[in-house]
Amino acid sequence: MDNLSHSVVGLAVGEFIHRSMSPEPNPEQQSVRKRLLLISCWLASNFPDLDLLLTHLLPAPLGYLLHHRGHTHTFLYTLPQALLIWILIWLLWPTARRLLQDSTTARKSLALSLGCGLGLHILMDYLNSYGVHPFYPYDSRWFFGDMIFIVEPLFWISFGVPMAMLIRRQWLKIIVIAGLMGSLIFFTAKEFLPWASLVLLITVAFVLIRIQYKADARDRSALILAAIISIGFVGVQNMASNRAKFEVAQSMKSKDSASRILDLAMTPFPTNPFCWSFVSIESNESAGTYRLRRGALSLAPTFMRVNECPAPFFQAVALTDATSAMVFSYEYVGDLKQLRELKQTNCHFEAWLRFVRAPLLNQTYASDLRFTASARGNFTTINLDEFKDRECSRNIPKWDFPRADLLSSVAR
């Protein structure tokens, strides 16, 4: 997820924990504890993304692909991260250190804030099609949620608005809330959001503003409602994703019954359970080929036809057989033998395959089709000729191959 979503969720969780725990003996300690939990949970909610500092360990693009959402995004490695944040707070924040020395409640609250912040970061990153491998080293598989767009304004509003209402300076509170509302209008004007989603999000914002405005220092109503809205949205998106996969799979089977569907990578449009983009990964072992197809789908074509889905996410034009519900915009047929030989003969390509879910080979280049089918490639694109004669890199994480099912003639 984007770091604004991680941040507002972390701040909201820190505030919720603070309001849920018994108060400290005096107002000064209570004020320090509030700041401590907000800052610590915000830090924990963003801390795993410091793995970006490790990307220089491998040549581009391998460093980013294999080290971002890497070890810091595993449950085992949340433990040293939590300990590091605790130590930094202890060493650099004297008033917080005195509070932690004196208060068992503060220590419990801090531990809970760190655990929730780090755990929610991994959980939120799981929700999209990029994926995580949270159980490493016990299980090195990638897990893909395929249900939430990587930048989701609903989280900004549901958690950001109640937290903005807690800002003491009136002018700053107005600026933050206006900024959140303005971002929705901007994204709608740029056609990232449909008008119906804008109305829904603004309605949610005003309801939360009203509830938080009337709340006292211990009231958690707005935060609980924010959690209910967000969890409900994730549930709706999960059901919509499963339905979208079913619709795409049925269409695939009707087009080519000989191919075996291995995977469907689904990406929703922001705050829009009706519109989805997809990439299918199919295999035809007897023909020695695999196929990738990219397209878009509307789950409610009577309400919103697929060509009415937000324009920035609707790539290219239909190839064939476009309907009001589904359109295929790109198709690629790959050679299984070439894919497998490259894995065996090019160690950099082998490392690249530890990330890639939809491998597209184009002469000297390879890309992951999940992230657009542009002729310029995308951030995953690797120049195979450039890496062909290079010495094999060290520091290759041993993530499982997302496409292990394509890399061997034996189904796995």
Image (cartoon, grey):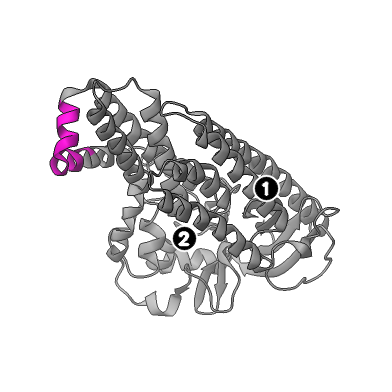
Looking at the picture, which amino acid does disc 1 mark? Leu
Give the answer, above or below, for where 295 lies relative to 264.
below
Q: Residue at x 56, y 52 (%)?
A: 153
Looking at the image, residue 42 sits to the left or right of residue 200; the answer is left
Q: Nearer the viewer, residue 372 or 90?
A: 90
Residue 383 x/y as whole percent:
44, 76
Read off the residue under disc 2.
Answer: 353
Residue sitting nearer the eye, 363 or 71? 71
Secondary structure under tag 2 reads loop
x and y percentages locating residue 32 in the rendered image: 25, 34
Q: Is residue 110 left or right of residue 350?
A: left
Say if 222 sits above or below 73 in the image.
above
Q: Which residue type does callout 2 highlight? A: Leu
Of helix, strand and loop, which one carries label 1?
helix
In magenta segment, residue 189: no
Give the side of residue 271 with respect to residue 83, left or right.
right
As measured in the structure, the alpha-carbon distance from the residue carrying label 2 to the one carrying label 1 is: 40 Å
Magenta extent: 86-101
